[in-house]
Amino acid sequence: DDTESLGGRARAVLGAGPRGPVTADLVADGPHLLVEGPPGSGRTELLRAVVASLAAAERPDRLGMVLIDGRDGVGTAAGVGEGLRSCTDIPHVTTHLIANDPVRMREFAQSLSAELKRRAELVGLTDFAHWHTAHEVSGRMVAQRGPGGRGPGNGDLEGPPSSTLR
């Protein structure tokens, strides 16, 4: 299995266990991670740690993250949707959405659907290892950010240039 050398691992550190770090490999274990619990149980702190651990393990040109805040901040000093905003300075974070904004969420869903279709077509055309080698970028490349790191409007980051999400 040459997945590791192709950058196909996305290990998120969830915490410490008796035998070392407890991780979720988002490639081997599946591409999704569900975090649930009652208010005040530490869900947002865990998600912040997951974002930080993923960012520490991979370069921004090889890993991009879209953060979607739900009804965070209920009963706390933070406002609704402010829980993950502190992660938006990480260069891997391309977009920060708040779930109670139906227009932006619909645009995001359409953009995500188009991107998944594009990727399926790419993978269908050639072997992934061959495609990855042909499209590898310099280890010195860093993702570009908009002026001041913030986009117009809600203080969200600019989406990637190929994105239809605005």
Image (cartoon, rainbow, N blue to C red):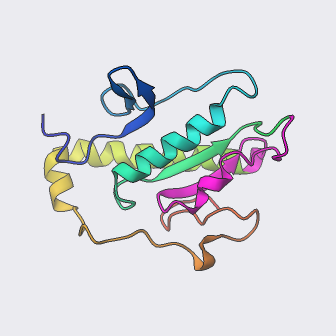
Taking the image as shown, residue 104 lies to the left or right of residue 134, namely right
Residue drawn at point x = 16 percent, y = 47 percent = 5
Above or below for 129 versus 93: above
Image coordinates of residue 27 in percent, x first then y, are 33, 33
Residue drawn at point x = 22 percent, y = 47 percent = 125
User: What span is colored magenta in the figure?
Assistant: 75-103
Taking the image as shown, residue 133 lies to the left or right of residue 25, namely left
Is residue 98 rendered magenta in the image? yes
Image coordinates of residue 138 in percent, x first then y, are 23, 69
Above or below for 94 versus 26: below
Is residue 93 rendered magenta in the image? yes
In this rendered view, identify the residue nearer to me: 35 or 112.
35
Rendering quarter of residue 86: bottom right
Residue drawn at point x = 22 percent, y = 61 percent = 135
Above or below for 119 versus 94: above
Q: Quadrant of the C terminus?
A: bottom right
Rendering quarter of residue 59: bottom left
Residue drawn at point x = 22 percent, y = 62 percent = 136
Taking the image as shown, residue 157 lies to the left or right of residue 140, namely right
Image coordinates of residue 14 in percent, x first then y, are 47, 31
In this rendered view, identify the residue nearer to me: 46 or 96.
46
Rendering quarter of residue 87: bottom right
Image coordinates of residue 23 in percent, x first then y, are 38, 30
Tell me, yes or no, if residue 6 can be seen here.
yes
Q: Quadrant of the N terminus?
A: top left
